[in-house]
C-alpha cells in the first residue's frame, strides 16, 4: 500500500478485519496461515474505503491542531465558523463583530489567553441563564451552576446538585448545548447512566442519540 503504514496482526480468527487509527495507521487482523497474496487482494478491494478513512483522519488531524491565531484562521462560536482578522490597533484587544473576530496586532502574543477569557465570559453570560431557564421549564431543581475547564467531560452533576458545564461548549451549536444541559439536569433525578436516566433524557430530547453522535464526531473541534 502506498503512503500508508500497515500493521499486520495474526491470531486465531477466521476472517480479516481492517481498522485505521487516529494516526492513520492501517491495522490488518488476519488468521494464522493466511497467505499475503490473499491479504493484499483484500486490501486492493477495500482501497476506496481505506482512502476515505484516511482522508477523514487527515481532516481530523488538521482540525485538531492548536490554533495559531493567524489572519484568516476560523474559530467556532455557537456552531458556526468565523474568521479572525489581525487589525492595526491597540484597544480593544479582542472583539467579536458578529461577522468576525478582530485581534489587535499588538496583543497577538497574548491571543490564546484573550480568546479563552472571552469565551469564559460569554459562557458565564449564556450557560448559567440557559440552565436556569431549562430547569424551570422541565421541572428540575439544582443547587448552583459552576463553569468548568475540564478536558475529559462536557459537564457534571455533583451529589449535592451542583451542575458544572465546560466553557468550550460555547463553540457548539445551541441545540447541542441544550442537550448537554438536559443531560446534567437529568442527573439530579437519576444519578447514573441507567435505562431510567436515558428514558428521562429521551422524553425531553427525543433525538438525543443524534446529539451524542455529533459530540463524538465533532467534540475534538471544540478547543482553542
Image (tube, rainbow, N blue to C red):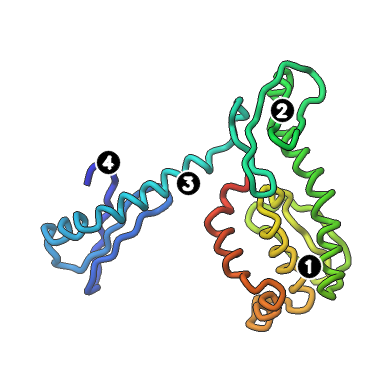
Residue at (73, 22) in percent of width and height: 104
Q: Secondary structure at mark 3?
A: helix
Task: Give the alpha-carbon distance from disc 2 to disc 1, as whole Å.
Answer: 38 Å
Residue 16 is tagged as none
Q: Is residue 69 visible?
A: yes
Residue at (70, 55) in percent of width and height: 174
Of callouts 4 and 3, the N-terminal one: 4
Of callouts 1 and 3, the N-terminal one: 3
The residue that label 2 is drawn on is 102
Q: Residues within 10 Å of mark 1 (few under 14, many from 20)?
A: some
The reply, left or right, for residue 182 in relation to residue 66 is: right
The reply, left or right, for residue 10 in relation to residue 82 is: left
Look at discs 4 and 2 and give the one toward the viewer: 2
Q: Secondary structure at mark 2?
A: strand
The residue that label 1 is drawn on is 158
Q: Residues within 10 Å of mark 2 (few under 14, many from 20)?
A: many
Contact? badges 4 and 3 (CB < 8 Å): no
Of callouts 3 and 2, the N-terminal one: 3
Q: Secondary structure at mark 4?
A: loop
Rendered image quadrant of residue 195: bottom right
Of callouts 4 and 1, the N-terminal one: 4
* Residue 5 percent coordinates (x, y): 29, 46
Residue 3 is tagged as 4
Look at discs 3 and 2 and give the one toward the viewer: 2
In terms of depth relative to the viewer, which is nearer, 43 or 172? 172
Look at discs 4 and 1 and give the one toward the viewer: 4
Of callouts 2 and 1, the N-terminal one: 2
Contact? badges 3 and 2 (CB < 8 Å): no
Amino acid at each position: 500500500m502506498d503512503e500508508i503504514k500497515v500493521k499486520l496482526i495474526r491470531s486465531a480468527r477466521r476472517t480479516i478485519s481492517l481498522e485505521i487509527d487516529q494516526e492513520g495507521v492501517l491495522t490488518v487482523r488476519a488468521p494464522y496461515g493466511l497467505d499475503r497474496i490473499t491479504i493484499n487482494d483484500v486490501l486492493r478491494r477495500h482501497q476506496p474505503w481505506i482512502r476515505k478513512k484516511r482522508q477523514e483522519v487527515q481532516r481530523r488531524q488538521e482540525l485538531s491542531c492548536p490554533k495559531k491565531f493567524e489572519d484568516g484562521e476560523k474559530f467556532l462560536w455557537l456552531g458556526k465558523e468565523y474568521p479572525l482578522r489581525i487589525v492595526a490597533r491597540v484597544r480593544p484587544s479582542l472583539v467579536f463583530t458578529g461577522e468576525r473576530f478582530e485581534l489587535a496586532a499588538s496583543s497577538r502574543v497574548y491571543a490564546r489567553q484573550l480568546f479563552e477569557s472571552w469565551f469564559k465570559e460569554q459562557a458565564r453570560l449564556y450557560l448559567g441563564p440557559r440552565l436556569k431557564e431549562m430547569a424551570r421549564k422541565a421541572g428540575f431543581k439544582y443547587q448552583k451552576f459552576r463553569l468548568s475547564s475540564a478536558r475529559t467531560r462536557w459537564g457534571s452533576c455533583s451529589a449535592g446538585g451542583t451542575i458544572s458545564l465546560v466553557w468550550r461548549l460555547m463553540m457548539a451549536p445551541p441545540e447541542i448545548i441544550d442537550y448537554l444541559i438536559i443531560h446534567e439536569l437529568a442527573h439530579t433525578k437519576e444519578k447514573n447512566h441507567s435505562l431510567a436516566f436515558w428514558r428521562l433524557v429521551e422524553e425531553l430530547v427525543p433525538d438525543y442519540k443524534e446529539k451524542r453522535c455529533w459530540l463524538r464526531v465533532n467534540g475534538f473541534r471544540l478547543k482553542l
